Image: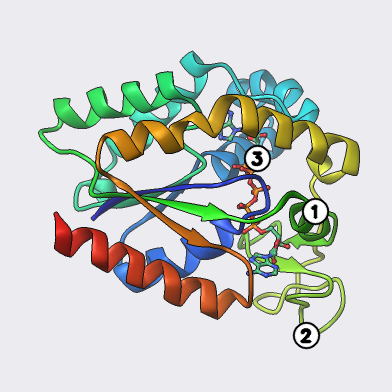
């Protein structure tokens, strides 16, 4: 299956992508995670991306598209993938369509996660992440067993640079202006399924699985 998750920052794309990718046995491809790994590894790509990420702006398309093309060409993505955070604007969506056409394939479903903006601010200001395994927690809604430590390997959890309230509000503006038009774009392509991303994580997963199954059976 080739699927895309779309939704505002904090909608739970990363959380749901991790669960769904495991259940569907396909790789989760998160552009935000790949950028962050490059920033912490001090690579050239990371140096180019960091200033945009810290401000909450999109990294330029030519950098992002080249990175995704390389990732989707890897063997583990040949049988399908779940994209989290890409595409982020209509030109990226057109590029993805072209990349897949070159490989003789296309997308099966685009799942939109809807959540209101005040909930997003609460979720992101309480988010903590593991630097080792990438698992995402929330200090209140999804707390680790020991405060500040990852349940998997006990690593010290960190707070993302772009999760300060002012930057969160800017990321929401970028989403409304540049990413939200994808909803209409993919609806026009007949690929869109929309669910509410409010409520417990397991409930959102269950809605996501039903929406994906319904879309695929209608195809
Ligand atoms: P990216 O990492 O993609 O950030 P984002 O889209 O802003 O999304 P987030 O990771 O903040 O949120 P999420 O929806 O994944 O929520 P999560 O599951 O973590 O991108 C970061 C930056 O990289 C961008 O700003 C840009 O600079 C650059 N970038 C990335 N892709 C790009 C692209 N294609 N083009 C250009 N630039 C790009 O959940 C959030 C919190 O809520 C967690 O604490 C979680 O535990 C909690 N939570 C999750 N679900 C629930 C629930 N149901 N109830 C309560 N709490 C919940």
Label 1 element class:
helix
Label 3 element class:
helix
> Which residue is outermost to the bottom?
145
Which of the 4 quarters of the picture holds residue 141?
bottom right
Q: Is residue 2 above or below residue 136?
A: above
Residue at 15 percent of width and 25 percent of height:
102
Q: Residue 36 got which mark? A: 3
Q: Is mark 3 within 8 Å of ligand 1?
A: yes
Q: CA distance from mark 3 to mark 2?
A: 25 Å
Q: Residues within 10 Å of mark 2 (few under 14, many from 20)?
A: few
Q: Residues within 10 Å of mark 3 (few under 14, many from 20)?
A: some
Q: Coloring scheme of the render?
A: rainbow
Q: Residues within 10 Å of mark 1 (few under 14, many from 20)?
A: few
Mark 1 lies on residue: 118
Q: Position of residue 32 (x, y in %)?
A: 59, 40
Q: Nearer the viewer, residue 28 or 133?
A: 28
Q: Is residue 209 above or below residue 175?
A: below
Please state which of the two labelled residues, at mark 2 or mark 1, is closer to the viewer.
1
Q: CA distance from mark 3 to mark 1?
A: 25 Å
Q: Position of residue 46 (x, y in %)?
A: 64, 27
Which of the 4 quarters of the picture holds residue 152?
bottom right
Which of the 4 quarters of the picture holds residue 131?
bottom right
Q: Position of residue 186 (x, y in %)?
A: 34, 37
Q: Residue 205 got which mark? A: none
Q: Is residue 140 above or below residue 16?
A: below
Q: Earlier in the sequence, mark 3 or mark 1?
A: 3
Q: Earlier in the sequence, mark 3 or mark 2?
A: 3
Mark 2 lies on residue: 145
* Labelled pair 2, 1 in contact (Cβ < 8 Å): no
* Labelled pair 3, 2 in contact (Cβ < 8 Å): no
Residue at 61 percent of width and 34 percent of height:
38
Residue at 44 percent of width and 33 percent of height:
182
């Amino acid at each position: 299956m080739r699927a895309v998750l779309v939704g505002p920052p904090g909608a739970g794309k990363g959380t749901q992508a991790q669960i769904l990718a495991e259940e569907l046995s396909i790789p989760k491809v998160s552009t935000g995670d790949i950028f962050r790994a490059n920033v912490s590894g001090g690579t050239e790509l990371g140096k180019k991306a960091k200033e945009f990420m810290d401000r909450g702006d999109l990294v330029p398309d030519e950098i992002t598209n080249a990175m995704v093309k390389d990732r989707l060409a890897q063997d583990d993505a040949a049988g399908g993938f779940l994209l989290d955070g890409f595409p982020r604007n209509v030109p990226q969506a057109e590029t993805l369509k072209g990349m897949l056409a070159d490989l003789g394939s296309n997308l099966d479903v685009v799942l939109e996660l809807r959540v209101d903006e005040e909930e997003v601010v609460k979720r992101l200001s309480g988010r903590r992440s593991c630097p080792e395994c990438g698992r995402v927690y929330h200090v209140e809604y999804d707390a680790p067993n020991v405060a500040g430590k990852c349940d998997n390997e006990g690593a010290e959890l960190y707070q993302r640079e772009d999760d300060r309230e002012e930057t969160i509000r800017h990321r929401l503006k970028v989403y409304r202006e540049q990413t939200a038009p994808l909803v209409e774009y993919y609806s026009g392509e007949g690929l869109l399924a929309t669910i509410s991303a409010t409520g417990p994580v397991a409930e959102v997963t269950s809605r996501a699985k039903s929406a994906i199954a319904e879309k695929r059976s209608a195809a």
